[in-house]
């Protein structure tokens, strides 16, 4: 009888310990990565501006990005994005240049989580952008087509398991513009490193995490 009671107690203890270990294992193993098969949808908002009080001129840039990505491997997501951009810059004492554009292309992200709340990522994009340019009043209208590559680092915060808030911090960019300029306006190659270009706030929702 005593042997049966002791055996039952040991079995109950082992079962309880196993269930507790299994319960603790899931968050411990999953807090440092986003698993394969998860889908992420979200977007980001970017705004930048400057002003010169002496000349009373200002520069404003606004962009809205939307993306959808699928994790093909632990912490690696691939997908596509769409972007809408508005830009207003001074074109002289009595005129401004106003530009709007729309574009998109493929994108990829690599995550590194430090704990269940905070992590970093690197985002790479290749995209095509079509722009309409209005110069002066009355406006003369031009068109522009550009293709480019941008690599941006970012910080991510998970307030809850399936929702993240991102801070994108500029990065490396390379683009070839004026593709619609014709023979008299050859294409222009631009490249550089900027901590401000592309900086923005983003929100993502993770399906299946």
Image (spheres, grey):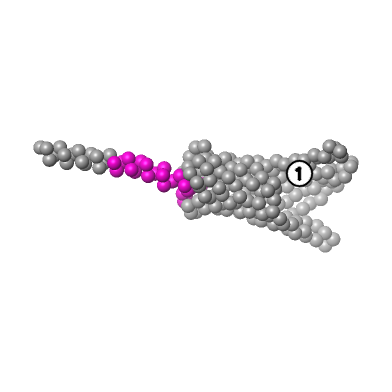
**Residue 204 forms part of the magenta stretch:** no
Q: Give me the residue at 49% from left, 37% from top.
A: 160
Q: Quadrant of residue 167?
A: top right
The reply to whether residue 79 is visible in this rendering is no
Identify the residue position indicated by label 1 in the image: 87
Q: Position of residue 75 (x, y in %)?
A: 50, 51
Q: How many marks?
A: 1
Tell me the element at label 1: strand
Report the side of 140 relative to 29 (left or right). Answer: right
Report the side of 159 relative to 91 (left or right). Answer: left
Read off the magenta span: 17-39
Q: Position of residue 176 (x, y in %)?
A: 73, 58
Q: Nearer the viewer, residue 208 or 149?
A: 149
**Residue 38 forms part of the magenta stretch:** yes
Q: Position of residue 205 (x, y in %)?
A: 53, 41
Secondary structure mainly formed by the magenta segment: helix
Q: Quadrant of residue 11?
A: top left
- The quarter of the image holding the N terminus is top left
Q: Give me the residue at 80% from left, 39% from top.
A: 51
Q: Give me the residue at 80% from left, 57% from top.
A: 181
Please rate how many residues cluster around mark 1, counting C-alpha atoms within 10 Å: few if below 14, some from 14 to 19, many from 20.
some
Q: Give me the residue at 37% from left, 42% from top.
A: 24
């Amino acid at each position: 009888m005593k042997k049966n009671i002791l055996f039952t107690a040991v079995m109950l203890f082992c079962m309880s310990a196993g269930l507790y270990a299994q319960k603790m294992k899931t968050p411990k193993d999953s807090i440092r990565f986003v698993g394969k098969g998860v889908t992420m949808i979200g977007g980001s908002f970017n705004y930048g501006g400057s002003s010169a009080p002496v000349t009373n001129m200002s520069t404003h840039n606004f962009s809205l990005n939307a993306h959808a990505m699928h994790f093909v491997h632990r912490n690696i997501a691939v997908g596509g994005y769409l972007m809408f951009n508005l830009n207003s810059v001074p074109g002289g004492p009595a005129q401004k240049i106003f530009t709007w554009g729309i574009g998109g292309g493929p994108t990829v992200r690599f995550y590194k989580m430090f704990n269940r709340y905070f992590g970093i990522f690197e985002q790479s994009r290749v995209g095509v952008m079509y722009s309409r340019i209005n110069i002066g009043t009355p406006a003369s209208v031009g068109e522009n087509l550009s293709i480019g590559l941008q690599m941006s680092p970012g910080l991510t915060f998970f307030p809850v398991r399936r929702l993240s808030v991102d801070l994108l911090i500029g990065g490396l960019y390379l683009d070839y513009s004026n593709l619609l300029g014709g023979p008299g306006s050859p294409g222009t190659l631009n490249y550089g490193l900027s901590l401000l270009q592309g900086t923005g706030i983003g929100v993502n929702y993770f399906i299946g995490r």
